Image: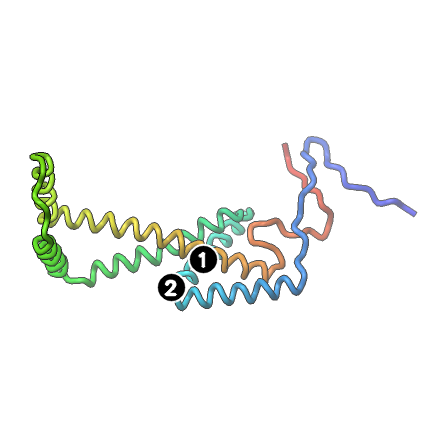
Amino acid sequence: MTIPRDPYAPAGNTFSPVTLAPAASTGARVAAALGALLVLGGGAIVTLGTVLFAALGMAIGGAIWRHRGKTLPVVGHWVASLCGAAVLIFGFGALTAAIVPRTSWSEVQKTIDSASRATPQPPARTPAESAGRAAARRAMSSPKALQVGMAYGFGFLAIFMIAILGTVGWIGGMLTGFAAQGRWPGTPAQSPSGSYSFGNT
């Protein structure tokens, strides 16, 4: 009777044990599927499908890395989901800017000017405060300043939405991958023929 031995690395190669993710039980995979349905289904209704686009970004990123013969790590899946959400949000913003008439910005500016004039302000206490108020009024009455301010505001809002919606889509995508494969996306698959890896030095 022969005693099985661990494989040995050929000369000139490296030899290191590989930590493999154990296969998940059926109950855990069913629970992950229900969680994915809840997160992606509910999120798709609330966010108008943005979280689904984020999960699609994860799938595309993972496919690109598999085509290169590598495994996209967990953090890489999160970054891919953020990219998926960013594509949809910035695309929606560009479409909105193209559809909205240019006269709408003038109407917004007039509304802001009317509101600022209607709001009573206490008299300035110092010349510096008076000069500051005059500079603020000039900035608010400038179309360029208004456009720059609105661009910064929409930019910060878009970054916040990308972070939140992309993370929600990442959670749903991770649960979907766990339910489908029995392991978290980004973790190494269990190899049926040993637990050692070889590589050239």
The quarter in which the C terminus is drawn is top right
Any mark on residue 168, and which? 1
Q: Position of residue 42 (x, y in %)?
A: 45, 67
Q: Nearer the viewer, residue 163 or 183?
A: 163
Q: Which residue is mark 2?
A: 47
Could you tell me which residue is drawn at 53 percent across and 49 percent down?
A: 74
Q: From this view, report whether residue 151 is shown above or below residue 201.
A: below
In the rendered structure, the answer to whether residue 150 lies left or right of residue 189 reads: left
Q: Position of residue 3 (x, y in %)?
A: 87, 44
**What is the three-letter code of the residue carrying label 1?**
Val
Q: How many residues crowd mark 1 within 10 Å: few (<14), some (14–19), many (20+)?
A: many
Label 1 with label 2: CB-CB less than 8 Å: yes
Q: Secondary structure at mark 2?
A: loop
Residue 199 found in image quarter = top right
Q: Position of residue 12 (x, y in %)?
A: 68, 31
- The span from disc 1 to disc 2 (Cα, nearest Å) is 10 Å
Q: Nearer the viewer, residue 149 or 193?
A: 149
In the rendered structure, the answer to whether residue 45 lies left or right of residue 13 reads: left
**What is the three-letter code of the residue carrying label 2?**
Thr
The residue positioned farthest toward the right in the image shown: 1
In the rendered structure, the answer to whether residue 85 lies left or right of residue 65 reads: left
